[in-house]
Amino acid sequence: MAVMSLFDPSGIAVVGASETPGKIGYEAMRNAVKFDGPVYPVNPSAEGTAFDREFVSSVTDIEDDAVDLALLCVPATVVPDVVEECGEAGIGGAVVFAGGFAEAGEAGERLQRRLLEAATDGDVHLLGPNTSGFLRPAEHMYATFATDVEAIPAGDIAIVAQSGGLAYALAFRAENEGLGVSAMVGLGNRANVGFQEAIEHFDADDRTNVILLHVEGTDDARGLLETCRAAETPVIAYNVGEQDVGDFAESHTGALTGRYELYEAGFAQYGVPTVRSSQELLDAGKALSTCPRPNGPNVGVVTAQAGPGIAITDRLKAAGAEFPTLTDETQEAVEEILPGMTYSANPIDTGRPMPEFGDVVAAVARDENVDVVMVYELFERGLGYPTEALEGLVDEVDKPIVFATGGPDAVLADELAGLESLEIPTFWTPERGADAVAALVQYALRNADPDAAEAEEVSR
């Protein structure tokens, strides 16, 4: 199914547009007019203008062929009729904000069947129903009634979530941390546009380097998994439902949660890294969107403080990481730099930050036995970070280097900007850095060969 009209429209109609602040039709219209293309307010009971645009009474009255997306800010009972009109008007995409469909019992299921029939007859691609919409910041496309969404910057991470609330939580958290998104989509009930269609669309999107999934449940798990495997863009999944939350999930988006263990095994078999929280999902996305693809699970750890290094190593071992012996050449180079009291095997502990810390990191990164480098260094004002020593290193070795640290808020953001500019993602706790590397390790294990996932499970 081609969903260009939905996610990449040329023009927008806001059905149920309103001039009354606080109403969904007002908030959706206020967001929509930021789009560079034509935007029409549609309301049969309104006159005059909304946001300096003349009201029209129906989408069938719009003569502009560029309008191919409708935002439906109308009650659930009239949604099927409006979608039928969209089909008549040649509008190929519609966002259905209203709830009260499959998630709301038998009557809602009947209404959703009516909606799907209207969409099928009119060749209309539906986001929702029961969705808070989507956004594409680079295109100033805010197809939502949520407020303050213009604060979310453009970037290369696509968020595709079953829950609109979790999608926005991730998008705003990304903004808090200086990250940007290529798209953010709340799928809702997935009447005829679901995981597969969204993943395929953003896999083909030049602005997207990684796709983050939030999954509550689906009636076509194999289709989801096969779509993930076929995607050239890395996909990472946050699969909820480890405990029995089936009734709650079904009342939310009409999702029937499957067995958590089966989903986890399926993602492993089909090459998809999985995480256990929304923060891990975002951190994994940051690492995979920033770093080169890892060739294997062999991690070289360099730490300036032993305690955080031990915590990182423990966490990575639990995730299936390997800690290879460094080559003789690397060990000789490291031992020339480090005093005898430090630990020069892998992981390497320098004891504290030192002027040559970056040289140690570079030596480990150049080691042919290492696929991923994990670095931890507390901030010390007198030394700063080894930005100059690491300049050009990622391009030279073509492997991920991930940096974790701690220090005062007032200095970290500015000080770490230099490392971020070198395509070295940075994290503010040992655990978050380790979890980001764990996602890279999962990606390498699960995409190395057809037997990788089985080998990973056996090793655990």
Image (cartoon, rainbow, N blue to C red):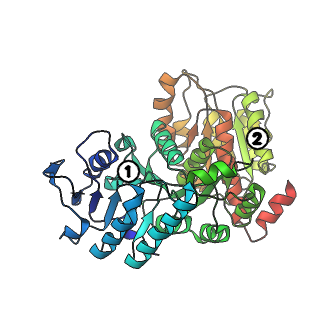
Q: Amino acid at mark 1?
A: Thr
Residue 56 in which image quadrant = bottom left
**Residue 207 coordinates in the image, percent (x, y):** 42, 59
10 Å neighbourhood of mark 2: few (<14), some, or many (≥20)? some
Provide the residue designation for mark 2.
Answer: 315
Kind of element beneath mark 2: helix
Q: Choose between 260 and 324: the one closer to the eye.
A: 260
Q: Amino acid at mark 2?
A: Arg
CA–CA distance between discs 2 and 1?
A: 39 Å
Q: Choose between 179 and 171: the one closer to the eye.
A: 171
Residue 332 in which image quadrant = top right
Instruction: Tell me which residue sits at (58%, 24%) in the image.
Output: 407
Tell me: residue 147, above or below residue 220. Answer: above
* 2 vs 1, front mark: 1
The residue furthest front is 107
Do the numbered discs 2 and 1 sit on residues whose CB atoms are within 8 Å?
Answer: no
**Residue 174 coordinates in the image, percent (x, y):** 49, 42
Instruction: Tell me which residue sits at (51%, 48%) in the image.
Output: 167
10 Å neighbourhood of mark 1: few (<14), some, or many (≥20)? many
**Residue 141 coordinates in the image, percent (x, y):** 33, 54
Seen in the image, is 180 located left or right of residue 13?
A: right
Residue 258 in which image quadrant = bottom right
**Residue 192 coordinates in the image, percent (x, y):** 49, 69
Q: Choose between 140 and 409: the one closer to the eye.
A: 140
Provide the residue designation for mark 1.
Answer: 144
Marker count (numbered): 2
Tell me: residue 40, above or below residue 34. Answer: below
Tell me: residue 342, above or below residue 164. Answer: above
Task: Inspect this view and state whether residue 133 appears.
Answer: yes
Query: Of callouts 2 and 1, which one flags the residue occurring earlier in the amino acid sequence?
Result: 1
Kind of element beneath mark 1: loop
Seen in the image, is 64 located left or right of residue 258?
A: left
